[in-house]
Amino acid sequence: MVDAQKDAPFKSAQVESLVVMKIVKHCSSAFPTTATGSLVGMDTDGVLEITNAFPFPTLDVSAADGHQADASSLAAAAPRAKANIAYQNEMIRHLKEVNVDANNVGWYTSATMGNFINLSFIENQYHYQRENDKTVALVHDVSRSSQGALSLRAFRLSPEFMAAYKEAKFTTESLQKSKLSFHDILIEVPVIVHNSHLLTSFLHQIPAPPESSEIPLPASLDDIRREPAPLPAYPFFDTLDVSIDPFLEKTCDLLLESIEAHYSDLNNHQYYQRQLAREQFKISQWQAKRKAENAARLAAKQEPLPEDEWQRLFKLPQEPSRLEGMLNARQVEQYSKQVDSFTATVTSKLFAVRGNLLPE
C-alpha cells in the first residue's frame, strides 16, 4: 500500500468548504436513498483540488421499467447512466462558458453506517478512473455525520485491481498469480477541507469567548441593561452516558449480515469444487475405460479410438467469480474498524465506573 501511494497520480484531495456543504445538503435531503453527483476541479502539484459539485438528476421510480428497480439502485448506478453522462458533459460545457474549473475529477455518493463497498461502487469508480486516472470517489456517511463529526472520505481503485477488473478474471488461479487480496481493492486518499481567504477572514472576526471564567457583578440595573451578562456554558452530560451506542448495535447487525453473505459465497464456491471433483472423477473413469478399449483394439490390430473425445462428452462447471467474496471481505473489514472505533469510547466509560459497580 505504501508503494501504491507513492505511484498514485495525486497525494491528497483538497475539497472546498462550499463543495462539502453542497454534498452534505444533497446527501442529507436524499437520506435514506443513495445520493450521487459529479465533482469538478483540477490537479495541481499532486493535490486534487475539488472546487465544485453538482448532483445527478433523480429518476422517477414509477416511470422506470421493471418491478425490481428502486430508488436506491437507480441512484447508485446514476454516475454511469448514459443520460447522466450527457447531463454531466452539458454542465461542464456551461461551467467552461463562465470560466470556472470544468475538469471532471470524480463523483460523490452517500453511505449509511459505512455500507458503500459493493459492485455498483466499483463499477462507477472504474467507469471514471478508466477514462481519467486522476479521479476520486468521495463518500459521505450521513449516519456518522449525524453524531456531530463530519465523515467524508476519498477512495480510488488500485492499479492492480484496475488491471484485474479490465480482464474480468477473478478466479482462484488468477488471484493466486496476481496475489490480489481484498486489501488491494481500494486506496484511501487523505481529504483536506479548504476555506477561501474571505471565509477565513470572517472566521477570524468572530468574537472569541471570554478568557476569564469569573463574571464581574453589575453595580446597578443600568449596567445590566447596557451590558447583559453572558450566560455560563451549559454542562453537557451526554458524554457520561454508559449505555451502548445505538450506532454500535446497528454496525454489529450489518457486520453479521456481511459475514452471512461471505459464508453464502463460500458455500457456493465449495459447491463448485464438489461439482468439479465429481466431473473430473467421471472424466478419469472414461479415460481409463477408453485406454483399456484402445489396448484391446491394438491387440486386435484395429485403429484406436480418439482419447480426447471426453471434451465433447463432458462439460466442466464454470468457476464463479470471486469478486463478490472479495468485496464482502472488504466490507467486513470496514465494519470491524467502525466497531473498534465505537467500542473505544464505551469501554473507557465502563472502566471508569467499574470501581463503583464492583462490591467492596
Image (cartoon, rainbow, N blue to C red):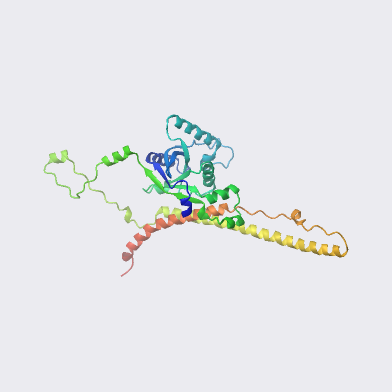
- The foreground one among 170 and 274 is 170
- The foreground one among 110 and 152 is 152
Residue 356 versus residue 193 in the image, above or below:
below
Pinpoint residue 266: horizontal percent, then vertical percent. 58, 58
Q: In the displayed structure, does residue 123 sit left or right of residue 39?
A: right
* Residue 1 visible in rendering: no
Q: In the displayed structure, does residue 354 sit left or right of residue 319?
A: left
Residue at the bottom extreme of this rendering? 360
Residue 26, image quadrant: top left
Pinpoint residue 143: horizontal percent, then vertical percent. 42, 48
- The foreground one among 150 and 7 is 7
- The foreground one among 193 and 249 is 193
* Residue 227 visible in rendering: yes
Pinpoint residue 345: horizontal percent, then vertical percent. 37, 57
Q: Quadrant of the C terminus?
A: bottom left
Q: Residue at x 16, y 38 (%)?
A: 226
Pinpoint residue 22: horizontal percent, then vertical percent. 41, 39
Residue at the top extreme of this rendering? 97
Residue at the front extreme of this rendering? 45
Q: In the displayed structure, does residue 38 sit left or right of residue 64?
A: left
Q: Residue at x 11, y 42 (%)?
A: 220
